[in-house]
Amino acid sequence: MTGEMEMDELFEKTKVASYFIWEYTQADNALALWACAEDTANFLDFSGIYDPERITDILHKGIYSLEYISFVRHIAYRLYIYINCEKEETNWFAAEKLLRNDEWRAAITEIAKIYNENKSNFDKLSIRSDIVKKNYSEI
């Protein structure tokens, strides 16, 4: 069963992740920022990434690495979807900036970890993103 402490942690980590998405994009739709953070954590969970160091390892592979390119592309795509910025370069650079931010990496991987630990009772988590809810309801 999901504890209240875990729910508080999920809320706080999502708030931190959303804040940095806002800081780097200046998007003004708070719900979209929140959903972007939730969906990004969903992507990390399905990719098996629960530790900020795993993201750092991908970043250290370098900008020409296919793993790096694919990973950044996934984050940039979510920025495009939720923030509605059609400038690919803007989304790409915001994604790279997020991925280099220690606090954002720690928050987003903790959210992914909480999602993973609660797959059997995911409906108990307070999730706002319909896409994320749907992804876990099909598991």
Image: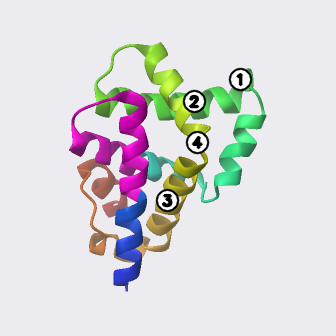
> Can I make out residue 2 in this image?
no
Q: CA distance from mark 1 to mark 4?
A: 16 Å
N-term mark: 1 or 4: 1
Image coordinates for residue 138, horizontal then vertical, percent:
34, 60
Q: Magenta segment range? A: 14-38
Residue at figure coordinates x 47%, y 28% from the top left: 76
Tell me the residue that label 1 is attached to. Answer: 63
Q: CA distance from mark 4 to mark 3?
A: 17 Å
Element class at badge 3: helix
The image shows residue 65, relative to residue 52, as above or below, that is above
Badge 4: how crowded within 10 Å, few (<14), some, or many (20+)?
A: few
Left or right for 87, reference 30: right
Element class at badge 2: helix
Callout 2 touching callout 3 (CB < 8 Å): no
Residue type (three-letter) at the residue carrying disc 2: Glu
Tell me the residue that label 2 is attached to. Answer: 96
Callout 2 touching callout 4 (CB < 8 Å): no
Q: Nearer the viewer, mark 4 or mark 3?
A: 4
Residue type (three-letter) at the residue carrying disc 1: Ile
> Can I make out residue 85 in this image?
yes
Q: CA distance from mark 2 to mark 3?
A: 19 Å
